[in-house]
Image (cartoon, rainbow, N blue to C red):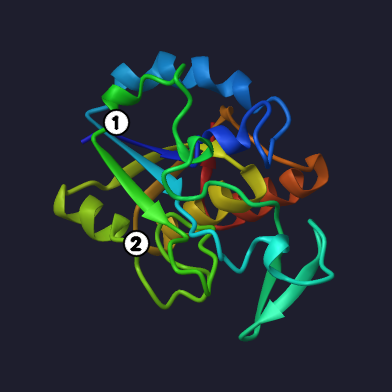
Amino acid sequence: MKTLVIVDLQNDFLNGGSLEIPNANKIIKPINDILDNYDLIVATKDWHPENHLSFSSNHEGKRNGDTIRINGIKQVLWPNHCIQDSDGSNFPVELDSNKIDKVIYKGMDSGIDSYSGFFDNAKNKSTGLSEFLKEKKVEKIDYVGLATEYCLKFTALDSVSEGFYTRVITKCIRGIDSNDCRFAFEEMRSQGIVLI
């Protein structure tokens, strides 16, 4: 079953969003153009409560981009984004979201972030994505979405560790920092992820 996973293509990461990723809107049309090539389309969504630990606003004296450690895990602090049921958490209207078969929600626990679409950052709790894909007998997955060096990368890395043949369609992803994206590509390649 030909499967596509769209990672975190949400308004807050697009033009004018609270955590805008440069040129992220430019991937919407290329993603729409390939949707009909797939039998199964899954999308992940950041789905944060307002008191989420990743928001700098919830840490006195801290700013966006600061890094802290919580329970031994490094945490980058971000602007408030993708708050549950907010417009920023929605898919963009330009995306053909009616073709999405399943939405996986992540980052719902206020006490831990979840970059990956498969697990929280401590790998303590599954989002249910792996179980869903295995029930559907999926073996190969293509990935698109945001952001290259964060949620996209960690989702793809977990995909490989969960036993899926994993490809990333590079024209359909965008990242925040070009240097960090280059390192992310190297890391993904080193783990057997195919970049196309």
**Quarter of the view holding residue 20:** top right
Q: Residue at x 48, y 60 (%)?
A: 49
Q: 88 or 103, which lies in front? A: 88
Residue type at mark 1 is Ile
Residue under label 1? 100
The residue drawn where x is 60% and y is 48% is: 81
Quick one: quadrant of the N terminus? top left
Mark drawn on residue 6: none
Residue at (35% x, 21% y) in the render: 35
Where residue 99 appears, x then y in whole percent? 28, 24
Residue 32 figure quarter: top left
Up the image or down, 62 lies above or below 186; here it is below
Local SS, label 2: loop
146 vs 109: above or below = above
What element does badge 1 sit on? loop
Q: Is residue 28 above or below residue 103?
A: above
Q: Quadrant of the C terminus?
A: top right
Decide which of 157, 71 is in the foreground and name it: 71
The number of numbered badges drawn on the structure is: 2
Instruction: Give the residue at x 52% y 21%.
Output: 28
Residue at mark 1 to residue at mark 2: CA–CA distance = 17 Å
Mark before the other along the chain sequence, 1 or 2: 1
What amino acid is found at the position of numbered circle 2 in the picture?
Thr
In this view, the residue farthest toward the bottom is 71
Q: Position of residue 31 (x, y in %)?
A: 46, 22
The percent coordinates of residue 191 (x first, y second) are 55, 58
Residue 127's tag is 2
Q: Can you give x and y, in whole percent of width and height, for residue 89 in the image?
A: 48, 41
Left or right position of 112 against 36: right
